[in-house]
Image: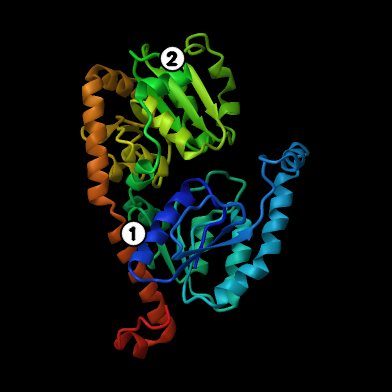
């Protein structure tokens, strides 16, 4: 059973692709997720609605959130879901946790699962703290798991624990292929962007640590570029409000705010020439793999897992360092390279990611982790005879 709490967004995209690949290898897979999930998976994958949310998509949810009670309400709903989660876990050979939206509540869930004998595998999609006010998930959750998976060597070094397996993040070619085709000129027109200028996209959950401020500073000193910002606001737009009012940027920035359906995601990438990843710290990025899937190159700071997933000069550009000045220089270099070179790097990004990050290999490596956990749980005699029963 894979536990993926949110039912939508980047971790859900990853979980869906992994579940399909594991099923293709003959495993029986279920996903414990949100009751209002957005999964569309083959019948072989059992999707279980476990977690209920107060979201801003309903009038009642907006009322609760405006009152400042959204986190409290969702926290109580999460706790109410734990008894069912534990009951489901008892009937599964392995429980694979994809992280939790709030580490403090995730610790309670992991302890409850551990107490009932669940064999837990934990994937650390990020190995750094986004806020100093929260628990560090990578210091706590691996201690409650039988095995931990990370996506990059940088993540493995950061965690520094022995029972850690590196399994790369899989490509998102299938997600891009499942989106409706969008003509780039039509996409630009829909966003009010001109055809003849280069467009840089900042895409994903809009947190302050995603580098919007750096990108706006770089853009202000790099004439010619336009910026499309797309995603759900989690503080980045508010933090950059003064920069967004800069007269040098007022006509050069478009914002598409909110959780975007796949058709709108495709429109964003069709309009863009390149995706910006000016993160000061990074593990791996679902937005990067979406860009590669849509055959768009990236411009990234040389940090964390980006050093392993961006081929400078081939799938995009790595900045000289993680500063707005270096980002401005790289934007100028990309603009000078021209439209044909941008498209060449985008095509290379798509082909290289499918060569390197195939889901069949990722599923095989993940199954090997499951087998190792089961072998330790069932003892040397089970392992000596090959195991494999009862998965």
Earlier along the polypeptide chain: callout 1 or callout 2? Answer: 1
* Residue behind mark 2: 220
- Write the residue at 54% across / 18% down: 244
Dividing the picture into quadrants, the one containing residue 167 is bottom left
As measured in the structure, the alpha-carbon distance from the residue carrying label 1 to the one carrying label 2 is 39 Å
> Measured from the top left, where is residue 180 in percent x and y?
40, 36
> Measured from the top left, where is residue 355 in percent x and y?
22, 49
Specify few, some or many for label 2: CA neighbours under 10 Å numbering under 14, 14-19, or 20 or more: some
The secondary structure type at the circle numbered 1 is: strand
- Write the residue at 37% across / 11% down: 223
Residue 144's place in the image compared with 289, above or below, is: below
Residue 77 is left or right of residue 119, and the answer is right
* Residue behind mark 1: 166
Q: Is the image coloured rainbow, by chain, by secondary structure, or in one colour?
A: rainbow
Q: Quadrant of the image for the C terminus?
A: bottom left
The answer to which of 320 and 240 lies nearer the viewer is 240
The answer to whether mark 1 and mark 2 are in CB contact below 8 A is no
Tell which residue pokes out farthest to the bottom in this image.
381
The answer to which of 113 and 17 lies nearer the viewer is 17
> Measured from the top left, where is residue 272 in percent x and y?
37, 26
The secondary structure type at the circle numbered 2 is: helix
Residue 198's place in the image compared with 314, above or below, is: above
Residue 306's place in the image compared with 323, above or below, is: below
- Write the residue at 35% across / 61% down: 21
Dividing the picture into quadrants, the one containing residue 332 is top left
Residue 2's place in the image compared with 297, above or below, is: below
């Amino acid at each position: 059973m894979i536990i993926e709490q949110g039912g939508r967004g980047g971790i859900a995209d990853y979980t869906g692709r992994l579940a399909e690949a594991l099923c293709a290898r003959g495993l029986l897979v279920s996903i414990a997720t949100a009751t209002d999930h957005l999964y569309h998976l083959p019948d072989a994958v059992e999707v279980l609605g476990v977690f209920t949310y107060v979201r801003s998509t309903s009038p009642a949810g907006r009322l609760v959130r405006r009152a400042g009670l959204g986190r409290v309400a969702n926290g109580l709903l999460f706790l109410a879901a734990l008894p069912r989660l534990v009951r489901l876990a008892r009937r599964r050979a392995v429980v694979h946790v994809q992280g939790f939206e709030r580490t403090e509540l995730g610790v309670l869930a992991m302890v409850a699962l551990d107490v009932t004998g669940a064999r837990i595998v934990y994937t650390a999609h990020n190995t750094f703290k986004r806020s100093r006010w929260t628990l560090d998930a990578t210091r706590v959750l691996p201690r409650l798991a039988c095995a931990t998976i990370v996506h990059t060597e940088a993540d493995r070094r950061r965690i520094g624990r022995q029972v850690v397996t590196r399994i790369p993040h899989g490509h998102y070619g299938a997600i891009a292929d499942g989106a409706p085709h969008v003509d780039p000129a039509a996409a630009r027109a829909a966003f009010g962007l001109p055809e003849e200028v280069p467009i840089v996209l900042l895409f994903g959950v809009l947190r302050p640590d995603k580098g919007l401020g750096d990108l706006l500073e770089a853009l202000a000193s790099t004439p010619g570029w336009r910026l499309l910002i797309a995603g759900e606001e989690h503080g980045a737009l508010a933090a950059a409000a003064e920069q967004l009012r800069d007269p040098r940027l007022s006509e050069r920035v478009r914002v598409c705010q909110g959780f975007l359906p796949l058709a709108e995601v495709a429109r964003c990438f069709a309009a863009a020439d390149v995706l910006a990843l000016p993160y000061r710290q990074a593990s791996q990025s679902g937005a990067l793999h979406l860009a590669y899937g849509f055959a768009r190159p990236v411009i990234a700071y040389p940090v964390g897992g980006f050093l392993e997933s961006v081929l400078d000069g081939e799938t995009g550009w790595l900045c000289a360092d993680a500063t707005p000045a270096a980002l401005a220089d790289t934007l100028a270099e990309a603009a000078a390279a021209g439209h044909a070179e941008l498209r060449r790097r985008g095509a290379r990004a798509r082909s290289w990611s499918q060569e390197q990050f195939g889901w069949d290999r990722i599923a095989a490596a993940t199954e090997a982790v499951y087998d190792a956990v089961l072998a330790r749980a069932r003892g040397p005699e089970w392992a000596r005879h090959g195991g494999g029963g009862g998965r």
